[in-house]
Structures are given as structure tokens and as C-alpha cells.
Amino acid sequence: MKAWHDECAVFGIWNDPEAGRMAYLGLYAQQHRGQESAGIVTLDRGAHISRKGLGLVGKIFTEDYLEALRGNSGVGHVRYSTTGNNQIFNIQPLTAQLRKGPLAIAHNGNIVNSAPLREELIASGSIFQGTSDTEVLMHLVAKSKANCIIESLKESALKLEGAYSMVIQTGKKLIAMRDPMGFRPLVLGRRKNDQGEMSVVFASETCAFDLIGAKYEREIEPGEIFWVDEDGEHSERFSPNVPLARCVFEHVYFSRPDSFVFSQSVYEARKKMGRQLAIENPVEADIVVPVPDSGVPAAIGYSQESGIPFELGIIRNHYIGRTFIQPSQSIRSFGVKIKLNPHAEILRGKRIVVIDDSLVRGTTSKKIIALVRQAGAKEVHFKLASPPTTGACFYGVDTPKRQQLIAAQKSIEEIRQFVDADTLSYLSVEGLMEAVGKDSKGYCAACFDGKYPTRLYNLDK
Amino acid sequence: MKAWHDECAVFGIWNDPEAGRMAYLGLYAQQHRGQESAGIVTLDRGAHISRKGLGLVGKIFTEDYLEALRGNSGVGHVRYSTTGNNQIFNIQPLTAQLRKGPLAIAHNGNIVNSAPLREELIASGSIFQGTSDTEVLMHLVAKSKANCIIESLKESALKLEGAYSMVIQTGKKLIAMRDPMGFRPLVLGRRKNDQGEMSVVFASETCAFDLIGAKYEREIEPGEIFWVDEDGEHSERFSPNVPLARCVFEHVYFSRPDSFVFSQSVYEARKKMGRQLAIENPVEADIVVPVPDSGVPAAIGYSQESGIPFELGIIRNHYIGRTFIQPSQSIRSFGVKIKLNPHAEILRGKRIVVIDDSLVRGTTSKKIIALVRQAGAKEVHFKLASPPTTGACFYGVDTPKRQQLIAAQKSIEEIRQFVDADTLSYLSVEGLMEAVGKDSKGYCAACFDGKYPTRLYNLDK
Amino acid sequence: MKAWHDECAVFGIWNDPEAGRMAYLGLYAQQHRGQESAGIVTLDRGAHISRKGLGLVGKIFTEDYLEALRGNSGVGHVRYSTTGNNQIFNIQPLTAQLRKGPLAIAHNGNIVNSAPLREELIASGSIFQGTSDTEVLMHLVAKSKANCIIESLKESALKLEGAYSMVIQTGKKLIAMRDPMGFRPLVLGRRKNDQGEMSVVFASETCAFDLIGAKYEREIEPGEIFWVDEDGEHSERFSPNVPLARCVFEHVYFSRPDSFVFSQSVYEARKKMGRQLAIENPVEADIVVPVPDSGVPAAIGYSQESGIPFELGIIRNHYIGRTFIQPSQSIRSFGVKIKLNPHAEILRGKRIVVIDDSLVRGTTSKKIIALVRQAGAKEVHFKLASPPTTGACFYGVDTPKRQQLIAAQKSIEEIRQFVDADTLSYLSVEGLMEAVGKDSKGYCAACFDGKYPTRLYNLDK
Amino acid sequence: MKAWHDECAVFGIWNDPEAGRMAYLGLYAQQHRGQESAGIVTLDRGAHISRKGLGLVGKIFTEDYLEALRGNSGVGHVRYSTTGNNQIFNIQPLTAQLRKGPLAIAHNGNIVNSAPLREELIASGSIFQGTSDTEVLMHLVAKSKANCIIESLKESALKLEGAYSMVIQTGKKLIAMRDPMGFRPLVLGRRKNDQGEMSVVFASETCAFDLIGAKYEREIEPGEIFWVDEDGEHSERFSPNVPLARCVFEHVYFSRPDSFVFSQSVYEARKKMGRQLAIENPVEADIVVPVPDSGVPAAIGYSQESGIPFELGIIRNHYIGRTFIQPSQSIRSFGVKIKLNPHAEILRGKRIVVIDDSLVRGTTSKKIIALVRQAGAKEVHFKLASPPTTGACFYGVDTPKRQQLIAAQKSIEEIRQFVDADTLSYLSVEGLMEAVGKDSKGYCAACFDGKYPTRLYNLDK
């Protein structure tokens, strides 16, 4: 339904006799970040074992696959979308056998200068298998003259611009690396394994730690390379300090509400967005109703701040599969209706505040409001717990092009008319920053304010 | 997770050029009532077309299947569980070619005297294909000497004891029939089809009407047989008045909160159960947290009545597939954890009221409370928005045997110790009846109070 | 390729601890008699276990299925084609739970008066699940007042007209029964099982015995009912003697050349047809080439009788799957070419005798002759090791309707022109009877001579 | 059954509007050369389209796949076995996007010095995706400084030792290249396409031409590189003349009997081997029986030379799938029996000459002879239409290691005793060379005579 998707999650674990199964669970918990493909690579006695597939984690990884994924260390990846015609080559973790041994990379984010780097590498005789920007890093490392893999990675990373939160498995080390601006989250935790020893774990979101019973310790810092091997743990900064550009949309929509992202609770951040929305945009109404599931925390915040009662006036059907066959045209707003059923008994005759997290094209919001009106609502006040989205993302998020974003084309009043709400209000950029905390200068909000923190290399969106 | 399942939903539609597709949607909306198998039978120029399968509606019905299901009238069925080794024969709607023409029956409920009836029929030379109690009715109708199908059905129904809400397709009529005690819901609605004519629709729950844009009109009355054919609509009572025995668990758990069941909103009934629970069992606490998703309406009611803030402190993961591979034993309470993640940021240090709809064996509740404690809760007050379940159901619900019901074996204090809550409280039977309304004498609450409204024929549960 | 198909094979085994696996092997060996569906029913401690499916034996029966098919006795069936929209119900063995216990029937043949019998049964209240003529027998047995199953079967069989070679599993007995005219083959054998005890086995063809290491003993006689149970073996005649009508096409094409059918080697019978063809239709030629695989034995016979060398001038490709995608129209005679490649090196400049077993519509023969000519043959003498097929079969063979049989519409000279052969000759009916042996009066050759041995009940072909 | 497999076939076509479908047919006809995987790459407006999969051609290429494979030129490949854990990367044609444009290689044969070349390339920063020796050539071409692809290929080919018959698709050319010794076949043909224009086609065997109606023109010469592009056809020699080493086993077993290989009919060559065998090893016997299907041509030759009648005394079952479930141990020689049924009626009491093409381990032959004896043969004279296999192959054939070859371990008399034949005889190497023609010096018979025509680089077999 949402036309704004995070593209990936990563996971890594060191020193666990069931590393493959832990990776499976870590990906399962992060399934919301990517449903198109998944893969796991483990390290077993110096060699890599890899299993990948298209689809959901629970479908791809059979008992046979998990049985095969022996070893004490491993990395995993889920991915939202794959492009190109040979998509199988793009499923991560990407793997290669280099002079320095086996290498497997799981990457969340997008490298904005991958096209020029790729051209250079092909001209020098490198053969690319897929279309992934991650493969560029692979080749840079393969060509590097540096003596050890850490030096090769640091040297190569300095050629990259853009977003990369990575977990990397070599033949001897497990490595986590995050770009200097820190676009995407990457967290470090520890878990007591079945032998009573401590495992080191990395993930995109802390919800992966919760599922496997690991304890969250801290973020991998922007510009940090952290690795663990037989000699223990190591950490270095590989870049000078630069202004941070953490993705604020992680708090708005991408991350799970039970995750801790950029050192803050997502649920609490969303509730604060809802509270702030109530402060900025008060309205007289009878009930506050969220668009489920993502609008629920903000609606609770709005209700608590405004004192207007919270009701689950729109019910979500959780049996929706991927292959649902559309009915004839005669059923209006069907695409939304199959998922969301407004409950007339609750809504009839009421003045309703409907809360959603964001509004991208407006077509879904328009349908929801129509359904709420058909159910008998007297007034519909549509409130978004984020600012108008006016720009595409180039840092690892799958977004529509700028011309498809309604807020880039229309005024708020025009949008209100389009979605047919009695009133329509957005959270301000300032309000959003207030909600995500004091160090809000460290966020990238380019999709709201157009201030892109890197060069864009004529990327087309 | 819940060991208490409704076994079926039915659907029927008359006079719609896309009857097959409407049935598909009607079943999709009622998928929560049965996920093991589904089937649709349409009537096309006097002949039946049937498509059935094991699994979810969205998997079974491909475009090919829907294309094949031509006709202006049809019935559909989803089923929770099939038993026996030739389960394909048990998938409903059951069909047969009788002397009087084709017959297809979709049945929700359970006939308690099917075993003795079956024995009699076999002795007289009838061949049964499956193990379904519905097939008994099929054979009674086949043997009936009555001249028309309506008379045959009425005559046969009088031999049945127990629960049957049925939709039946013949070669010329669409029929709805509900047992005299009215155990299971069955509703009548109308829909303006693409030709601008009115269709007649039947369903177990009104949420099926909402999806296809039909208007709810009324319940099919207990003891009523209603049919529609070329001559129009007809209704008769086929049995004398008897005390009603509508299933109160439909309001407690089975039905979707956005449905209207037994002439009442399920969401509102659950909120009232939550309010009543707050009145009967007040406690000092910081937040009210539902076990999602079924505990949400009662928790909202509890919060509104008590004034204690509502928080989504336990997050549900909606990506759980059917084939999830369990991890090693080292991860405690895993079965629950993969679905539910308590959000430590919200729960830590707080006194929590946890609200669930019911408690069957206690094992899941025990795990949920453990997770909430691990997340840092100071106190856990576990409250059930229904009374202790002390008896099995024989009227179309798949329940554990009596000896597996914790409330049939232990006192409330023992259950509290078992689930490790600081306090544990149930709603009273009186409170429950209060919540579902004034005519609460018309409900079957045998699973709570042991008062079975029919003979039980040594059924073993 | 051949438009003339046998519809079934049956198998039965008594007293073998691996009855299910033996049935699997017995069906595998008889796969050529039916490729559309297969099923096995075993008897395990008084109850039946059934596994069925659409497709080839090797696909349907997984290790799981074979594991499930426990028991010491069982019957199996492969089927060529299923009709009707609920084909799953037609897969044999058909099973039912009767008053006398479980019954499973595997049937090869066709009952010509099934339609009137069916009508009678439905009028008396019987419910039919499928469209199979075998189900008629099932209901006759269910309604029979006779005290034991053998008497019920005998009484019911006397109401049937047409072809039925059957193997039947009850709760206590394994039964073989063959219609009085003996249309279809049915053989009895014995096998020493792993415990050193003797098993009794039944099959349509002896090749099933060869695979499992059983010894062929004799045919089940036309009009014989043979059964084995805890009390040993029993045999009775259930009908008076009538003239036999064994299907001569079993020798012409249906049976495997390594089978012994109607007390005679199929390979030898076909070689004799080839020899007889050489005697009746001598020609001057350089080589004899069979249409593989079915034409090979007759071609060897022709070569031996005529002294003209045998060459494998047409090579068959055995990798043809079921889902081959046709190329564009530009490749002539493709349907045949993908299977058969004439070998130019052998054929070029030669006078060729091409031998095939039979000619139904003529379209395939026309294509084969065209390919042989393209490969450079100087003359093509097309010879059929059977007479012209001028009538459809109603006794369990899937044949085209009479108007689609080229020999029913055209003279031999017209057929020769149509297939574009230099000469075309058929074996005479007398020559065919000579080849199949002295008691040739006992054969049905209705498809060649139009003399149908039963009433036809307006069957439409 | 045969433990000696050819590993691949290739196909290429230029200037055909249905290039993808033609490649599909060309691979289908060559399916006997590789059943593990298949792939096709077409050239559509300068870009490559690729579709690959594991399994048989008829399974992999759906209508969707063929629809996608647009373009006027293309290459295809079938492969016998893939090794390594990421086998998907080894499915051919291998593809890459080079500086010079897209490149797709289909390769039959094996490069014996690929290991040292691979090491060098990895050390210089090349990333290998799979384990295929073909990928080495890909990287050599990618690194080549030569200006055009033809020069790069010629330059790279001179670094290779071993067997390579290749068809290569670039962005503008279709190229065929064969190693200087000519180990594997590679043929050139032409076909008039639907527009009336001529297409150029390449294949491993001429049977691919027959299926699509192409005309065989000549072999691609050993050491020749032939290409076709917008400027027409071109041919060059890229290596000096060296002694030829064409694989004699292509005639003995690999190629289809209807193919023309190394300028000679395979069927005729096999018949000559049979004739030669009769001359070298006469015996008194009643009938000559082939082990079907591969022994048939040699048995016909033997019969014609010796005058002993040819009989199809062993019947092959063509319904054997890949997943056949083995029965219990009690059925002797089962693995063979499921495929081959000796026909007792023919064999009983006779002195039999059994002809097979070759004998690798002896275990299958032993089982066949046992079955023939059980069927009642009086004497079994087992004759092989090739010499004893005493060495493994390193040139693109999957063979057992030397120690598993019975003829490398035992004398002929010991083998006779092992397989339990009355007499056992092989064709002499000289006799084999006589059968394949006058220029028999140009053959590699290393598996028979141990004279390997290249260095072996410590390859382990």
C-alpha cells in the first residue's frame, strides 16, 4: 500500500554454534525491511556456505537450508526490490572468492557514485555479474593492493559516496561498517550462546536482537569499522568527521515500533509525532482513529495530548496474500477495502480525526477517507504525522519519482480537495525534528526539505 | 496460538453475473473463520461448477478457477479443520447429483446426532464419501420422498440436532437455513449489482457484506428457511419455537470486530466486556496493554472506563508464515516471541494491566507474562475479558478436551501462580451477559457454565 | 501420438508385508496402460489406506505416500483418461465404507449399460460422486441384501453388461473378477515374499509380475470370481458360458511386447503379424524400417519372413516431455519430428518398407512418410500389421469416433493417396486371427469387422 | 545407467526472427548430451536476454521464457553435471558485460590448464563467480587489450589447452570456435527462415539441424574461428596445425545414432563396430539381442555380418522417471530390472549373443546377464562393441576414476567371471578405428589406449 519502501536489512553474528539459524531469526524479525529476497552466508572451517532465494524468509529457508548453513559466524540480508533481468545475481549477501579469501557482503543503503566507479572497473577488465552497487565495492576490494582485508575495505570505502551500513563475512573475520554520514541504522549487541559464551551480533534494527534474546549495546558509529576475529574485537574510524545524515523516515515509517533506532525508541518517537501534531493542529472532534497498523502509535499520542478518545475505527484484515485477484470495477476503492474495513458502528455520525504516518501519492488516503465517509462519519480530519514528502530518496529507499509525489505538485489545500477531507494537516519539519530529539541536526530530511547531503550524479528519480 | 477455533464460514449470492467472484470475496473477508480449505460452487444454466482446495482462499482460487466459476448464483465455504485420511472429500460445499437435480451445501456448525443417523443410512445402502456430518443431511435429502427440495430439507432438518447455519445451492434455488436454537450466526443482505439489479446475499458475518458493498438487512432467524428462486423470495419457519442458544464466544473471540453478529457490533461488545472488567476488577496501574490483536477492543474499553492510559506495549509481527522453523531450545518462550515483541521502552518500571480476550490452556499467557516481565514491568495484572473456560464445545467449534482446559482443573489462584501474574482476574458470566445485551438469556455459554442446550450423544471431548 | 488408448491397468497383492510398495511397482510396470492418474489402496488391520493422484506413478507416489500405505494386501490402478469436472472423484481404486465394511475397486474395462443402471439407482436415493461406470457397481453392492460380499458381487455382476476385469479389496478379502466375455486381460501369479511365504498377485499384464519377481500362473477365466482370505483361496464361476470376446487390439498395440496376454507372448504375436503381412503383401525393397517403438516386433517378423534387411532407419527421441512448446508453423510435420528423426544416411536412395502397428486417422502416418521421403527414400511401401480400423470401441478403450477413422471413410487407395505412400497394405482380419492363434474365434475384433458382441445402448462414438 | 557421460551440447543461430525458439529446439534435440541444466541467451537490439535453469529443457523453458527470449541471434547450452555449492553460477551460457559489450559463451569440452590460469587471474584482482573452466576464458577476454573481440578471443584461446567447442554471442557477432585438436564435435548448417532468408546455425550434433529443418554443411574445423555479423561470414585459423584428437567415444556411445559426427553417420559407425565385432569374435548362437537402446545398431550389424537372427529380447521401459523409489532388497537386480525386462518367451532355451556398446564398471552388465539367465537363456555370449575402457577422460566427459574402471583392474577372463557370461569379448582398438574410418589416426582413444594427447596438470581422476 505504501509507495515508500526501505530496501534492506542486514544481520551478522560471531561465535555462535548456530550462526545460520540465528541469522534466519534475525532476518525474520526484520522481514518488514525487505520481502523480495533473502540470503545467508556462514563461515564453516574457513569456507563460506551460501543459501539465497526470492521471496519471504520463511519460504526460502527450509530445514535443509538451515542444516546446510553450518558454522560459528555468518551474515544475512533481506531485500526489498531487485532490478535488472538477472536478479538472482543481485540477491545479497554478495559473495566472491578473492586472493585474500572468501568475502560476503550484506549491504543496506545506496552508493550514489556507483555508476562512474563501475565504468572505471569494467574498463580495467573487471566482470560484473549483477547490477547491484554493492558489487562495485567487491571489485574495489579485489583490486586493492593493501595487505589485509581491513585496509582494503577502508581504502575502498573512501572512494564511495552515499549510504552503506554493511556487515561483511571474510574467511576469518566478521566486520561491520557504516558510512560517515550514518544514513542507515546499524546496531551492535551481545548474546549469551548455548555454551555460555558471548556472541557478537549486528543488525539494522534492535527488534532482531529481541527475537534471539540478544542485548543491545550501542550503534555502530557513522564512519566506524568494527570487526571481530580470533584476536578479539577491534574498532577504528576510517573517515574524518562529517555532518550526520541519519534517515528521519526510519522513525516516521520504516522501522518497527518496537525497535530502538539511532539511540531512540521508534514507538516513542511516533507517539511524540502524534502529540506534536495535536499541538500544531488542534481540532474539535469525537474520536481519534488510526490508519492501521503504522498510524497507531501517532494516534495514541494524538489522543493522549488532545484528550479525544482513541478508537480502532478501521479494522485491518491480516489475511491479505500477495496474489489477490481484483474484483470487477463495480466495487469502489477495492484495493484499500480488502485490507481496511471502517467500522460503521463506531464512525457513524462522529467527527473523526484520522491519523496516518505519511502521504505519498494521495490515492490510498483518498480511498480511506471515502470509506470512512461511506461508513457515516460526519467530519473527517485527516492528519499526517510527518511533513509533506516533496523529494525522492537516493540513499537506499525505493520511492516514486518526484513528479509522482503529490506534495511536490500540489498545495496542501489542493491535496485536501483531492483526498476529500474536511481538514488536512501535516506535521511541520520542525515538529518532526522536535519529536526525534535534540540532536535533530544530525538527520537527513531531504525527502521533506530537499536538502540532499551528497552530490547526486544525475540519478534519475 | 489460540486453541479455540471457529470451524467455518458460509457465503451465498443470488442474481449476480459475477457470483463466483463475489463468493471469492465473501470468503476472503471471512478467512479468519477457517484457513484449512475453501470451496465455491456456482450455478450455471442449471448445472453446478465446483472448485475447491486445501489452504487459504487467496492461494486456492486462481484466475483460472474464478474464470471457470460462471453463473449468476453460488455458495462458498471456508473450513478450519478437516479430519480423516481422505480429507479432500470433506471440503465444502459438499455436492451431489440427486434425483431432484444438483445440490451443494455449505454448513457452519455441528450436528450432534450425526453418528446414529449415519449408521442407519449405511445400513440402508447409502455410500458415504467422507466423514463430514453434513453428508448425513445430503443422504437424508436424497432418500426423502417429498416432492420438492424445500419439503425434503424441512423434513430432513427435523431429524437433526445441534448447530447448522447453512447456505444451499440447488439447480433452481438458493436456500439459507438456520437451526432452531440459532447457535451460529447467519445474515441476509442485499447488493446492487453491475446491472443495477438487486442481488440477495447470505454470510456468516457482516464483514463479508462490507467488502463487496452489500447492505446488511437482518439475521436469518433460528428455525427459518429462506429461499430465493425465479418466483422471488420466500421464508418459512420449519420448527416450533425453542429457547435460543446463540454462541457467546462469537462475541468474545471468533467474529471479526468490524462484524455485526446476533444484531450487535462485535467491537462494541468487546469494548463493553473491557469496561465491565474494569468495573468488576479495578486495579492501580500505570498503563493498559492489550495482547494483540484480539485483546485490543477490550483494552480500549478497560482504559476508557478506568482512565489508565492505553499503550501498544506488545508489538505483533504480521510476517509469521505457517512453516516457521523453531530455533534451538536456548531461546525461551520462542513460539510466542516470534509473534509478539514486548516493547521494553514502554513497559520498563511500570505497573501493567495486560488484557486478553480469553485463556484456554494458560501456556501462551504464561509466556506472554514472562516476556512482559523480562521487558522490565514492575507489576503484571493479567485480566481476561471473558469467564474461565471450563467446558468443550460440541456445536461447531474446535476446542481442546475438558481435561486440557486449565480452568476446568485449577482454581483461579492456581492459574495465577501458573501464569505468574501479580493478579489475575476474569470477567464474570453475568458481566459477560451484561456486555452482550439485554436478551442475554438467548445465549449458549456452555463452555463457561456447563449448561449444554442439547443432548450430547456420548461425544468425546 | 496414437489416437487409440487402453484406459487402465489393475494390480492386486495378498500376503506381502510390503503390499503398498509392490502395488507401486506393479503399476509402474503397467504405466503404458494409463498415464493420467493412479491410486493404491492397502488393507491395514481391517481398515483401508488410500493414496491417489493425477499424473504418472513415479510422480504421485512419494516416499511419504509409500510409507503411509502400510498393510499386507492391496490393490492399485492406473488410468488413461478422466472426464468430467470433478475428476478427482473418478481416480481409482474407488472406495467406500459399506455396511459390510470397506470396499475398494480397481476396474479395467467399460460397462455398457451403466447409464440405465445409474438412473435407477439415483431414483432410489443413491448419491453418486463421480461419473465412473465403476461407481454403479459400488452402489449395487451397497444395496444388495446378500449376506456376504462375494454373494453381493456375484449378484451385482449379473446386472452388468460389457467389460470388467477387476481387482477388489475388502476388509478381509482380495478378489479378482472378470466379465464372462473376457474382454480385458487379467492374470494370476505368485511370489515368494521376504518372509519366504507365498503372495498371491493379480495384474492386467504379466510384465508387472516380471518386475516384482512373481511367477505367472494362469489367466483369471472369463466369468470367474477368485478370492483369497484367511481361509485360503477360492474360485467360482458366476455366469454361464458365453462366447469369448477377448480384445485383439491388446496384441496389436496395447500390451507391452514382453507381456504374456490371453496365454500368448505379445512380442511373438506381433512378429507373426509381421510375418503374415510379408506373406500377404510381398514387395521388392531394400530395407525394412519400423515406426518405433511399437512397430519394431512386426518389422523384425517382416524382415525374417521376407529376407529384406531390418534397419532402425527412424530414430525415436525419448526425452519428449508432456509440455513441449510447439515452434512456429514454418517447421513442417513438427509434432512427429520432435519424436521421430528419419536417418537420411540409411534411407537415402533406398526402397523402404515402413512397418507400423496400425493406422487410425492417417495424419501421423502421412507426416512420417513425408519425413522419410525428405530423407531421400526412393520408394515408400507403408504396411500396417493390422486390418483397417473401421469402428470405435465401447469396452474400455479410448478411441476416436467412427467418423474420424480414416478407414471408415475412405478406400485403401484413397488412404494411400492421403498418406502419399507408393504402396499401402493392411493385414487381413484372417491373417490377424492366424497370428493370434488357433482359438481365434474367441476374440473381439469389432473395431476391424464391426461385429460388436454386446448391445450398445445408444453409446455415442 | 551408464557411468560415462558427455557433459554438454552447444547451439547457435544467426539471423532468425525466432532465434530463442530455435535454440530451444536445438537444445531439445541434443538433450541426451546433458540433462542437469540448460540455458539460452539471445541478442535483442544490442542487449542480451538470458534464461537458464536446472533440469530438462522441456521443464525449464516455459512459454513465458520463450516469449522473453526475443531477438534474431542466440546461443544455447545443455550441461550434464554441475559441481560446487553455488551451481546456479555454472549454468551456461556464461554471460558478462565487458568493456567491449555483452558476451555469452556456450562451451563443450574441458580446459585442462584452467586451474593455473585461474590462480593467476585471481591474484590480479579478477572475481570468479563459479567453478567453471569457461569462466577463465571470460576473464582472459575481459583483460585482453586487443581492440576487437575476435582478436581477444584468438589471443586468449592460445593460452588454453584441452577441449573447447564453443559458440559465443557478443553484442554484434555470433562466433563458433573449436580447439586445435578438435576433441568435441561442432557443426555448421544453414536454414531458410520464415522470411525466406538464410540463417546460419551451429550445433554439437546434426540431429539439432534435422529437428529445425536446417541443412548440414560442414564441421567447424579444429583450430578454426568462424563468425558472422552484419558484414557477412568470416573464417580464420587461429592456431598452427597439430595432430587431431577427435573423441572416438562420440561414435561409440555419446552421439545420437541419427547424427552425423566428425563427417560420418553415427548409426553406420556403430553398425560397422557390430560387424567388426562379429568378424573378430565369431560364436555359434541362436539369436543376437541388443541391450537397448544404445546397443541396437551394433547388434543389427552383428546380426547382418553373422547371419544370426536379431531379436528384441530385452524390452526397455521408457516411463522411468528420475525419482523412482527403490523397493526392498528382496527384488534382485532391481535397478536394471525397472528399465529392462528380458523377454523369457524369446530367450528361453536359446544361445544368446548379447551386444552392448561398452562396459565401464561391470555392475550393470552383471545384472543384465543375470536377468537374461533367469529368463532361461542356455548360453550368454556378452560382446562389447568397443575396447576395454582403461582410463578416465579429461576432455569434457564425466567418467569414473581409473580405479573404478573394471578393465583397468581386471583381466578379460576375470571380468567374464565377474559378469558371469559364458564368453566375453571386446572389439579391438584397431577394429574400432577401422569402423570409424580411414583417417582414424585423427582420433583420441585415450580411455582405451592411455595415449593422452595433452599435458594433464595433475588432474585427479
Image (spheres, coloured by chain):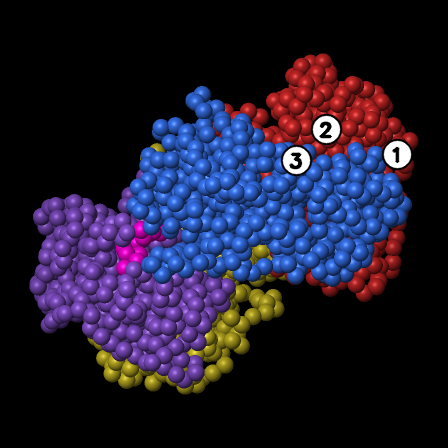
Chain colours: A blue, B red, C yellow, D purple
Marks 3 and 1 sit apart, C-alpha to C-alpha, by 68 Å
Indicate the amino acid at tag 1: Val
Does the magenta run of residues contain D136?
yes
Residue A461's x, y, as percent? 59, 59
User: Could you classify mark 3 by the number of other residues whose Cα lies within 10 Å: few (under 14), some (14-19), or many (20 or more)?
Assistant: few
Instruction: Find disc 1 in the rendering and name its residue.
Output: B242
Given residues C218 and B149, the one toward you in this image is B149
Q: Which residue is mark 3?
A: A438
Label 3: element kind: loop
Tell whether label 3 touches label 2 (CB within 8 Å).
no
Asked if residue A437 is among those painted magenta in the image, a careful observer would answer no
The answer to whether one can see residue B15 in this image is no
Which residue corresponds to the image point at 71% horizontal and 51% vertical from the top-left?
Answer: A388
Residue C457, x across and y down, in percent: 60, 66
Q: Nearer the viewer, mark 2 or mark 3?
A: 3
In this view of the protein, which residue sits in the foreground, A192 or B32?
A192
Q: Is residue C59 left or right of residue D332?
A: right
The chain ID associated with circle 1 is B
Q: What is the chain letter for disc 3? A: A
